[in-house]
Image (spheres, rainbow, N blue to C red):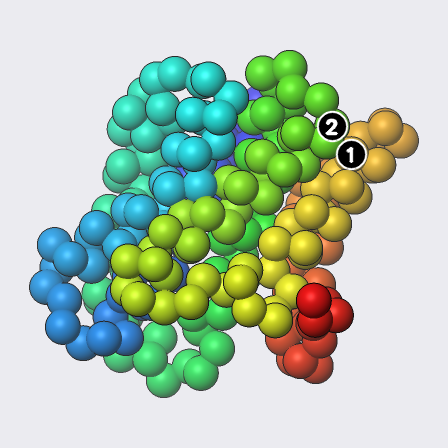
Amino acid sequence: MIDIQYVFELFGTVVFAISGALAADERKKHDWFGIAVYAFITAVGGGTLRDIFLNSYPLVWINDMNVIFSVFIGIILAGVFFNYFSRLRKTFMFFDTLGIALFTIVGLEKAHSLGANDFISVLMGMFTAVFGGVLRDILINKTPTIFVQEIYATACIIGGIVYLILESLGIDRNSNFIISGAVIAIIRIVTVKYNLSLPKF
């Protein structure tokens, strides 16, 4: 039987690598190695922090070369189709949204499997989803998305809560994964489209 978590983790790694490559190239000063570094940090940064916090070793990308291959695939796709992606105004937002939707649930399930409680599992899902992007944005000297008005990390938390609720209702795991991930993506897309944000401090 196909492990839906593993499939989505690899797919999420690909789309986050694309997201990282597209974000880095905005400055137009990077060679392929530089782009690869940004893509790698975006794709595995959040999962690495999650594993460190949960004391889970070896780190996922060290233990599984398929994760590294997925990053390379994302970099190649970003390079080959860069002109096409550049013509689409919201391509970066699309890949970023898809990435956080997938990685939130992946991170939550990983934390659950290691015995974390529901609260910590939701937080670890959010960390997995957003902190690769935070590290990427810091390195390219850009204010991380979670520190500005857009609803970003909050969407991940809501999606994680939805996952736990559906799990308690006995929803099939694969269906739950897809539904919860879709909730995150929809929240993110709607809030960006209508410029919605949390109240200012």
Q: Quadrant of residue 104 in the image?
A: top right
Q: Which mark is residue 164?
A: 1
Q: Are marks 1 and 2 in contact (CB under 8 Å)?
A: yes
Q: Nearer the viewer, residue 135 or 6?
A: 135
- Which badge, 1 or 2, is on the more N-terminal residue? 2
Which numbered tag is attached to residue 118? 2
Classed neighbour count for the residue bearing mark 1: other residues with Cα under 10 Å, few (<14), some (14–19), many (≥20): many
Residue at horizontal 53 percent and vertical 41 percent from the top: 127
Q: Amino acid at mark 1?
A: Leu
Could you tell me if residue 84 is visible in this image? no
170 to the left or right of 190: right
| Mark 2 Cα shell of 10 Å, populated few (<14), some (14-19), many (≥20) | some
User: Which marked residue is nearer to the observer: mark 1 or mark 2?
Assistant: 2
Q: Is residue 30 above or below residue 133?
A: below
Residue 76 drawn at (x, y percent): 22, 57
41 relative to 143, above or below: above
Q: Amino acid at mark 2?
A: Asp
Which SS class for mark 2?
helix
Which quadrant of the structure image shows residue 31? bottom left
Answer left or right for 137 relative to 5: left
Front-most of residues 177 and 29: 29
- The residue under the point 58% across, 34% down is 124
Residue sticking out furthest to the right: 169
Q: Quadrant of residue 57?
A: top left
Image point (59%, 25%), residue name: 111
In the current view of this chain or complex, which residue is farthest to the front? 201
- Asked whether, in this view, residue 46 is left or right of residue 149, the answer is left
Quarter of the figure that contains the C terminus: bottom right
